[in-house]
Amino acid sequence: MSNRELRGIREIPEGETEQNPFDSVKFTIGAEDTNGIAVTVQAMEDQDELSEKVVLEIWLAATAGGAPSAVTSEVVDTGTELQEIVNHGHYKIITDANGVAKITWTIAGAATRYCNVLYKGRVFSSSLITWAA
């Protein structure tokens, strides 16, 4: 099959690759416990939960898709930390075998942040996460 042939209903121009518009991530935000909030990220492909390991970049920011904002501390609960890009703020994580990464972020005092994830070249942002005073 050449790049000029139809795939579904969209022709892929030569030199381009097809990106599935249904690839995304699903966020689950836990309740605050001793200043920590667990954020679970599930990689999705074709609207289904992934069943393989992938590398995700994950960070907290004051705005959706914004620059990393440091936190007091964090723990990677599920997945493996591959690289800490910004101290206490931005990580490359290898998910578990089901495409899941879970990080517990701790911030002392009142704060709001978005969890942002880079997956397949696209940035996805959670709803606003709030830490109480």
Image (tube, helix red, strand yellow):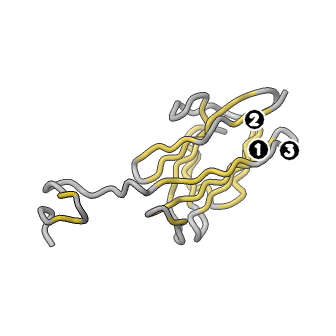
Question: Which label belongs to residue 37?
Answer: 1
Between residues 84 and 70, which one lies in front from this camera angle?
A: 70
Residue 38, image x and y in percent? Answer: 74, 49
Question: Which label belongs to residue 33?
Answer: 3
Please name the residue shown 62% across and 57% down the image.
Answer: 101
Question: Can residue 87 be seen?
Answer: no
Residue 104, image x and y in percent? Answer: 74, 48
Give the position of the C terminus as an image quadrant.
top right
Residue 106, image x and y in percent? Answer: 77, 39
Q: Residues within 10 Å of mark 1 (few under 14, many from 20)?
A: many
Asked if residue 6 lies left or right of residue 31, the reply is left
Numbered circles on residues, count: 3
Please name the residue shown 59% across and 69% down the image.
Answer: 98
Nearest to N terminus: mark 1 or mark 2: 1
Residues under labels 2 and 3: Cα distance?
Answer: 14 Å
Q: Are marks 1 and 3 in contact (CB under 8 Å)?
A: yes
Could you tell me which secondary element the residue under label 1 belongs to? strand
* Residue located beneath label 2 in the image: 72
87 to 77, vertically: above or below: above
